[in-house]
Image (cartoon, rainbow, N blue to C red):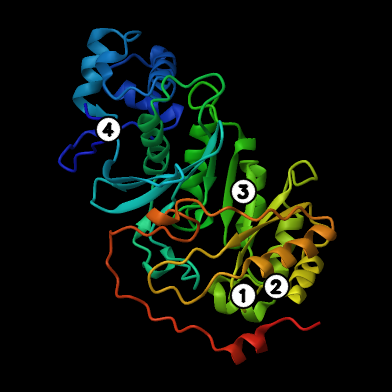
Amino acid sequence: MNKSLELATDIRTNLIGMNRAELACAIVEIGEPAETAKMRAKQLWHWIYHHGVTDFAEMTSLNGMLRDALASVYTLARPKIVREQSSEDGTRKWLLKFGDNQEAESVFIPEEARGALCISSQVGCTLTCRFCHTGTQRLVRNLDAREIVSQFLVARDSYGEWPSPGGGRLISNIVMMGMGEPLFNYENVAKAIRIVMDEEGLSISRRRITLSTAGVAPMIERCGAELGVGLAISLHAVTDELRDELMPINRKYPLSQLLDACRRYPGASNARRITFEYVMLKGINDSPMDAKALVRLIAGIPAKINLIPFNAWPGAPYECSTPDAIAKFAAIVNAAGYSSPVRTPRGRDILAACGQLRSDSVRAPRISLATPSRSANARRSVTS
């Protein structure tokens, strides 16, 4: 069976995304005795998530009758790869089409001997952040656990990383930073992350998984308690006035509520710092006063700040801050004792960089976002 093809006409149930208990029930439904179902589910899990097989015939530890019964009712098909692009810097992006013809993108960002897979949690997005390309596409629907996990499987297929190696894998980290807001799809995201973390399958440590949120404050503490993964906050502004404009979610969960939730995040420590993501927008949020206000804002939170040069997209309403402005901003934050690396843009040539993802599922009318005037920028600047 073609690993990259999920046929809309295939009426069989896909086992990818089921947890162990659900796999056991699925096996019982095709005639396996209940007393052996747990053991068979463990074997099935190993074949799906350790070996990455898509053909039940390859599961040689299962008897032939069970393999045939599985193949007649169930499938392990991947989403269809509509487009696979490789950047000149080695970044790779996949546009994936699911069974209902909706699409989402995922991106692999390689480093020297490892790399992070950026996974989407929704088709489109409901947040309409002004600096984000995904925000120009309306929310179509949540991705289910199967569709979230399948993004990882497709990437493993592409790099030939089966069976799951004990170490040294290229795809070593996961960042839930793709299309959509993960905490607005928490149940599916949490189920997918638990599958990915399982030590008998994909075996990605929770320390190698980071979930990024635009600031769904009430869900942050639950995420930390139940999943224990790294937390990244899309911050991007140091006043409610500006953040309301850049990120409308701030009107519901303002900075005070968001930062209180961060201070309560379970497991946050100097060894496991919360990452605050801060996109650098020319004349909007990049002044030395903004940098000093940021330091005051996050006081007492074990944190690092990722400074992200703005990645333009067609029709984008902003410009990237100058290198000099970014360097001065970083120096102020560093001097206050916070690590503030400047993220090197990756995959810009294939629109795979931070804030550039957008699928073709819904060709929404282009949103006209006029660039704020110089005088308006000045009014929003922090002056004290």
Report how far apart the C-alphas of labels 2 and 1 lie in the structure: 7 Å
Q: Are marks 2 and 4 in contact (CB under 8 Å)?
A: no
Position of residue 161 measured from the top left corner of the image (x, y, whole percent) = 43, 25
Q: Which residue is mark 3?
A: 223
Q: Nearer the viewer, residue 6 or 353?
A: 353
Position of residue 260 measured from the top left corner of the image (x, y, whole percent) = 74, 62
The kind of residue on which mark 2 rests is Val
Q: Nearer the viewer, residue 116 or 17?
A: 116
The kind of residue on which mark 4 rests is Ala
Q: Which residue is mark 2?
A: 238
Q: Is 134 displayed left or right of 73 in the figure?
A: right
Q: Earlier in the sequence, mark 1 or mark 4?
A: 4
The answer to which quarter of the image holds residue 375 is bottom right
Position of residue 363 measured from the top left corner of the image (x, y, whole percent) = 27, 67
Q: Earlier in the sequence, mark 2 or mark 4?
A: 4
Q: Which residue is mark 4?
A: 77
Q: Are marks 1 and 4 in contact (CB under 8 Å)?
A: no
The kind of residue on which mark 3 rests is Cys
Location of the N terminus (image quadrant): top left
Asked if residue 158 is positioned above or below residue 246 in the image, the reply reads above
Q: Nearer the viewer, mark 2 or mark 4?
A: 2
Q: Earlier in the sequence, mark 2 or mark 3?
A: 3
Q: Nearer the viewer, mark 2 or mark 3?
A: 2
Q: Earlier in the sequence, mark 2 or mark 1?
A: 2
Q: Which mark is residue 243?
A: 1
Q: Earlier in the sequence, mark 3 or mark 4?
A: 4
Mark 3: which secondary structure? helix
Position of residue 273 measured from the top left corner of the image (x, y, whole percent) = 74, 48
The kind of residue on which mark 1 rests is Arg
What residue is rendered at 75% in x and 68% in y? 294
